[in-house]
Amino acid sequence: MQIDRKLLEEIISDHDRLVFDHIPTEYLSDALGHLHGEADALLFPKSTVEVSGILRYAYENHIPVTPRGAGTNLVGSTVPIKGGIILDLSRMNRILELDEDTMTAMVEPGVLLQDFQAYVEQRGLFYPPDPGEKASSIGGNISTNAGGMRAVKYGVTRDYVRGLEAVLADGSILNTGGKQVKDASGLSLKNLLIGSEGTLAVITKCLLRLVPKPEASVSVLVPYGDLQTGIQSVLSILRADVAPTAVEFMERKVVALGESFSGIKYPRPDAGSYILLTFDGHRDEVEANLQRVRELVLGDGAMDYIVLADPRQAADIWRVRGALVKAVEAVSEQWPVDIVVPISQTARYIRFINELEAVSGMRMVSFGHAGDGNVHLCVVRDGRDEAAWQEQLHRNMEKAYDKAYALGGVASGEHGIGIEKRPYFLGETPSENLLVMNRIKDALDERHILNDQKSYITGGPKNAEVI
């Protein structure tokens, strides 16, 4: 593929922001590094004008473009499978405005979640979306509609995006949404772009909604003899109107891996599973909810009720939870899954996974967001050769996804579809839905230069046929 270096150097004048030779391997993959692509150029724009110029050039010359942010994606969305240009937005990392009157902030897509959250909390405000990877970028969070630990109370990223500036495939600049609370004016183009995994446009500015910072936040670790009892107890908590901020479940076997990885030990190692809860809000309200939940869970068979009053201990417990995928990866190559089922079906689905593990002999460790039915699995390779790993993995994943769909679930809650989930997503999604999605792709990117053959995309340029 021929790339006009001189023309790109006219768009980006700083030559240290253009790489044409010896592109580092980390830019050719995602966070796990299992899949690798190839590219002809790696570009680091710093403005909307530069992004527009690059896309206009790519569109006119039919050059594929793979957008990326912090590179924390887990399903191959950032792998450049068709060559061309990697568009890295990590240097567009400024917080442009904080409007305390409308409780909004305008940021560039490369701002890291952890930096933005710290920035607004220092000013008495709060940005609730809280995916496990805090070093992810805001643009990446929006592109996958990231959820995370606090979704059970606060919702997901989509609920905190008021507006977007985005560059379409042909270089034209789209502005949608705004600081107003309500908007019933035509189609919601903003919501169309959220969760689209870089297939429809490149996000260049993000207008985000904020809320007041809670007065108090307290976490509780609840050990159970087995995961089934813990998951059933979650339903009691959710029905009790105690507004938990986070409700996480973890099997003991994955916590043990997290302990080895982090050096942090959990209380009650004799437990079979744990439920990790957080409550926030006014101090009196938090204290009342803590007492009410204590009575509920002990009545439901909990082994203990450990209030993490020491902030350092709470931070350590959550640090282990946040590092579970990396902890498993440190032991063996693994396949991360984030299937979602209705909350009422979570225990049933986990029971099915444990049965599948026993029958197949393939290790599957479970954790995730019990409060919204988002089940995270790490399917572990454990020394299998490549042929056995691929064959057994995909056979078991077909069963796992089939069961999730049968229970009314979906393929992903927050990781996106990318490359790795496409077979399971395309195989179960109604053809009518795929046809509409691909017509939208054709309308916004008729030459299919943006992250093509990822997620829902089943056809090539001007081809909405389902294959």
Image (cartoon, rainbow, N blue to C red):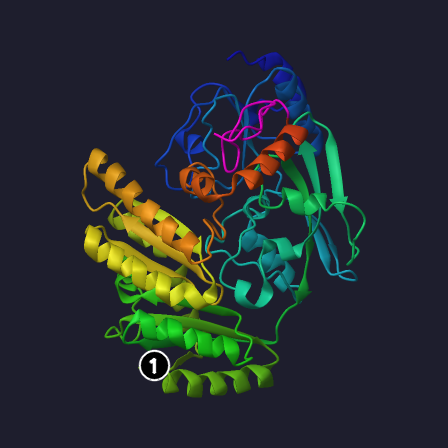
Q: Is residue 456 magenta?
A: yes
Report if residue 257 is visible in the image. no
Q: Position of residue 222 (x, y in %)?
A: 37, 77
| Extent of the magenta region | 446-467
At x 34%, y 62%, the residue is 350
Helix, strand or loop for the magenta stretch, by majority:
loop
Q: Position of residue 218 (x, y in %)?
A: 50, 76
189 left or right of 311?
A: right
Q: Where is residue 173 in the image (x, y as percent from the top left)?
A: 73, 33
Q: Does the magenta stretch include residue 424?
A: no
Circle 1 is placed at which residue position? 302
Q: Is residue 199 above or below residue 23?
A: below
At x 75%, y 40%, the residue is 175
- Towards the viewer: 91 or 349: 349
Q: Of the residues shown, which amino acid type is indicated by label 1?
A: Ala
Q: State the SS at label 1.
A: loop
248 left or right of 91?
A: left
Report if residue 250 is visible in the image. yes
At x 57%, y 44%, the residue is 143
Q: Is residue 386 above or below residue 103?
A: above
Q: In this view, does 357 lie above or below 418?
A: below
| Residue 434: quarter of image | top right
- Towards the viewer: 255 or 184: 184
